[in-house]
Image (cartoon, rainbow, N blue to C red):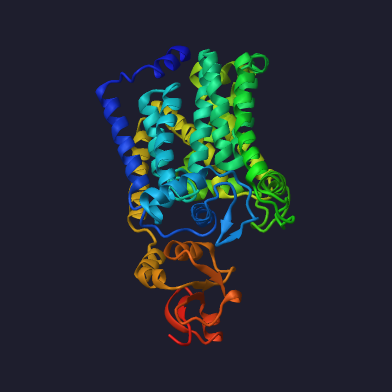
Amino acid sequence: MVRRRLEKSSRPIMRKIPDTLLLAGTFLLFAFLEIWKIGSVSVFEWDEARYGIHALGMIQNDDFVNYYYLGTLDIRTGKPPLANWLIAGQYLIFGKNEWALRFHSVWATLLWFWVAWRLVSAYKTPRFACLTLLLLAATNGIIGFHVGRTGDADALLILFETAAVYFYLQYLDVGRPKALLWVGPLLGLGFLAKSVAVFFLLPGLFLYTLLRGRVRSVLFEKNGWITAGGFLVFPAIYFGLIHFWGEKWETSSYGGDSLWTTMLSFDILRRFTENIAEGSYDPLHIVHVLDINFNLWNYLFYLAVGWFGWRFWHTRDRWRARLCAPENRLLTLSFCIIISLSVLLTVSYNKHQWYFAPAWLFVAVVTVDFLMRVGKKYPQVHAVWAVLLVFTLSRKIVDTHAPDTRLRDFFRAHQARLASAEKIYTHPAIPQHYHLYLAWSNPHIGFVGESRPNPRALYFLEQKDVVARQLKPLDCIDGFCIAAGKNE
C-alpha cells in the first residue's frame, strides 16, 4: 500500500545492495555533471551577471538591502535578495570569480537531488527514482542554463518548491499533520529566492488535492493555517527591510518607486500580461522548452502523454478511482503539475525556458512510468531506452567537457592591467557580463560621459567607439576592446 511505502521512505534507508549502489552511482554522476568545470564557463549575460553585480555592490556599499549597478541605484529589478546575499558571502569566501558566483546553485541542486529522490521513492521503487534522476542528469532542465549551472536563483527556487511539495504529500498521502508545518517556511524561502515564482506549483497541488477529495480537510486543518502564517513571515521580512532601509526613486519604466512596488508591478502583473521587452508571444512555448531541455526524451514524453490519455479514455467510467489509486498517485500528481504550469505559461505573454524548471522532475516521472509499464509487456523496450540513456548521458558529458571559456580567458589575461588602472570607463549599454568582469577586476568603474583626460585610465568600449574617440586599442573580443587614452 502507498501508506506503507510512504512511511518506509521516511525511515533510515534500508535497501538491497544493488539499489544502494545504483543510488550512489546516480548521485555521483549527477554531482559530477553539476560540478565539473562549472567555474570555467564564462559568465552569461542578463540575470547571472546582474546577480553578480548586485552582490558586489552590496559588499562595496555595505548595503545588503538595495541593489546597485556599477555605483548607481538599480531600479530595474524587484526580486528578493536571498541569491544576492548568498553570492556576496561566496565572494568573501572564494573571491570574485565564476565559482563563487555559482556555488549556491551547486549545493542547492545537489540537495534538490536528495529531496527529489525521497519524493519519488515514496511512491515508487528506489530503482524507479534513480532512473528518473538519470534522465534529468542526461538533459538540461536541471543541470543546465539558468538553473543548476549558473549563478541565478532558480536552483534555490526548485529546491524549496520541491521540498514543500514533498512535505505536503507527507501530510496529504501519509496522514502526518505536522509535516504540513514545513510547507509554509519552505515556500517563504522560495519567495526570498525568486518572488512569486514560488507559487508556480500550487495550482497543480490544488488540482491533485481536489481529485483526492481533500480540499475541505486541508482548509480546516489547524497546521495549514499555522504554515500559512509561517510563509507570510518571509514577505513581511522583505517588506520590512525595504520599508526601513530601502531607497525610493521616481517611477521607472519597470513600474514602482521601490524594490517592493517594482516587484508587485513588474514581476507579478506586467510580466504575465504585457508585451515588455522580453520577446514576442509564443503559443508553443512548452513544446520549444521540451525540445531544448528534454531532448531526445521529449519524444518519449509525447508518446507517454498519448498512451496515458488513451488508457484514461478507455477507463473513463471509473476515472476517479484509477487516478487516485495508490499505484497511480505520483503519476496523477505529475500530470496535475505539468498541465497547470503549461497552461499558466502558455497564456502568459512573457516567459522563459527556465520558468518550467519546477516541473522537470514530474516530466521525467511520466516518461519513466510509461517506459516501465510498456517494458513489462515488451521487454525489448528496455534495451532501446538504455541505449538512449547512454547516448544522452554521453552527449551531456561531451558538452560539459567543452565549455565556452573565451570571455573568462580574455579577462583573466588582462587581470593585472585592469586592476592597476586608476579607473575604467565603459558605456552603460555594454552587455552586463562584460561589466561584471570589469567590476571583478577593478572597483573604480565610470561611464564615458564622466571621463576626463587621464593617462592612467583604461576604457572598455565597442570597437567603433574606440576608433571614434581616437583611443589606443590594446586587445579586443567580439567587437569590444580594452583601450588606453591618447597619452599612454
Coordinates of residue 488 in the picture (x, y in percent)? 43, 85
Camera-side residue of 180 and 169: 180
- The residue depicted at 46 percent of the width and 82 percent of the height is 455
- The residue depicted at 58 percent of the width and 52 percent of the height is 67
Q: How many marks?
A: 0
In the image, taking residue 428 as reference, residue 13 lies left or right, namely: left
Camera-side residue of 16 and 258: 258
Identify the residue at the far left of this view.
17
Coordinates of residue 394 in the picture (x, y in percent)? 33, 49
Say above or below: 481 vs 158.
below
Question: Which image quadrant is residue 98 in?
Answer: bottom left
- The residue depicted at 48 percent of the width and 83 percent of the height is 485
Camera-side residue of 60 and 8: 60
In the image, taking residue 327 as reference, residue 110 lies left or right, namely: left
Coordinates of residue 204 in the picture (x, y in percent)? 61, 30
Question: Which image quadrant is residue 15 in?
Answer: top left
Q: Is residue 321 visible?
A: yes
Which quadrant, please, contains the N terminus?
top left
- The residue depicted at 28 percent of the width and 26 percent of the height is 20
Coordinates of residue 452 in the picture (x, y in percent)? 56, 80
Say above or below: 162 vs 350.
above
Question: Which image quadrant is residue 70 in?
Answer: bottom right
Camera-side residue of 487 and 167: 487
Q: Is residue 316 visible?
A: no
